[in-house]
Image: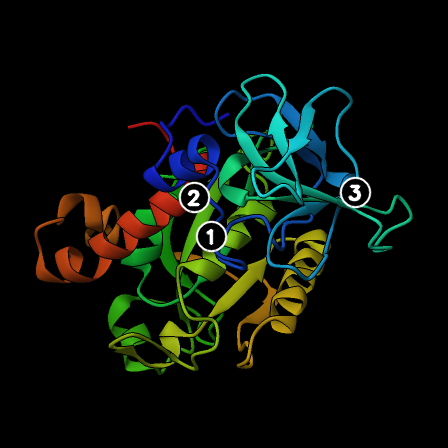
Amino acid sequence: MSKAPLTPQEHQVIEHKATEHPFSGRFLFLSNAGTFCCRRCDTALFKSESKFDAGCGWPSFDDEITGAVTRKMDADGRRTEILCSHCLGHLGHVFVGEKLTLKDTRHCVNAQALQFVPQQVAIEQQTAIFGGGCFWCLEALFQRVRGVVQVTSGYCGGHADTANYRAVCSGTSGHVEVIKIDFNPSEICFGQLLELFFDCHDPTSVDQQGADKGSQYRSAIFTMDDEQQQQAKQHMATMQQYSNAKLVTQIEPASVFYSAEEQHQNYFNDNAQQPYCAFNIAPKLAKLTEKYADRIKPQ
């Protein structure tokens, strides 16, 4: 689990009973098997099979792990507050009688109060390939994610028999700037990576991310197997229900991946003072590492 300290926002939610804005947190579209635990003390709180889409903008569960959650009357005198039974950190509220599931119970939980532990699997390492704008930006974020073993910048999805930076930037090869992520699925699951991917770029923008324009910057997921394909499509379909704009991310089986030139590897870490890194990558990185502190490697 993450040993990163609580962020200011997590601190406000867990210790001062603040409520995060709806549709602003993590886990809304996560469907992987595993356990949701307390962000502060790691206590297991909810199983993934009890999670359901209530349409309210917060992660919702119709059951709790026995003894893990404590109920008490909220300060408003109307609602029932739920807390982690171990550390008494604020989680959210529980509602009964809404008839949303057969169990007729909705634990409405602040995502900032949770962290997710994927179900243990026998496979030691898996791969994901994402394209969403400049690969320098994507690489910088995913290098910092717990469970990620290696991130390689490169090119995928083109029609030419080879790929290099000049050809890809010209648009003649048809390739996308991507990153290849090798990760441990027992520490971070594909669904958690999808959450980060969709949040770190604009999946409604055609062939452009910020000032970076061209087909090489299109939003794309290159799947390694049928399971990834199905999960990516399901994740995107659920997101689309809550988006006012059409999501344009392409989802297709991975073709040949070409590693980018050496000067493009580890780019942000080696060039943090370069203007593009300082003014474009660094602010985005700071925002996302705070929002997803539950899955960021300790400094």
Helix, strand or loop at label 1? It is helix
Looking at this rendering, what residue extends furthest in the front direction? 77
Write the residue at 74% across / 19% down. Answer: 67
Callout 2, which amino acid? Tyr
Q: Position of residue 94 (x, y in %)?
A: 71, 41
* Left or right, residue 171 beside residue 78: left
Specify how the rendered protein is coloured. Answer: rainbow
Q: 201 and 154: which one is in front?
A: 201
* Left or right, residue 96 beside residue 41: right
Q: Is residue 260 visible?
A: no
Callout 3, which amino acid? Asp
Callout 1, which amino acid? Leu
Q: Which mark is residue 292?
A: 2
The residue beneath circle 3 is 62
Q: 138 and 38: which one is in front?
A: 38
Helix, strand or loop at label 2? It is loop
Q: Which mark is residue 231?
A: none
Question: Are dots 1 and 2 in contact, CB under 8 Å?
Answer: yes
Q: Disc 1 or 2, which lies upstream in sequence?
A: 1
The residue beneath circle 1 is 196
State the CA–CA distance, disc 3 to disc 1: 25 Å
Q: Disc 3 or 1, which lies upstream in sequence?
A: 3
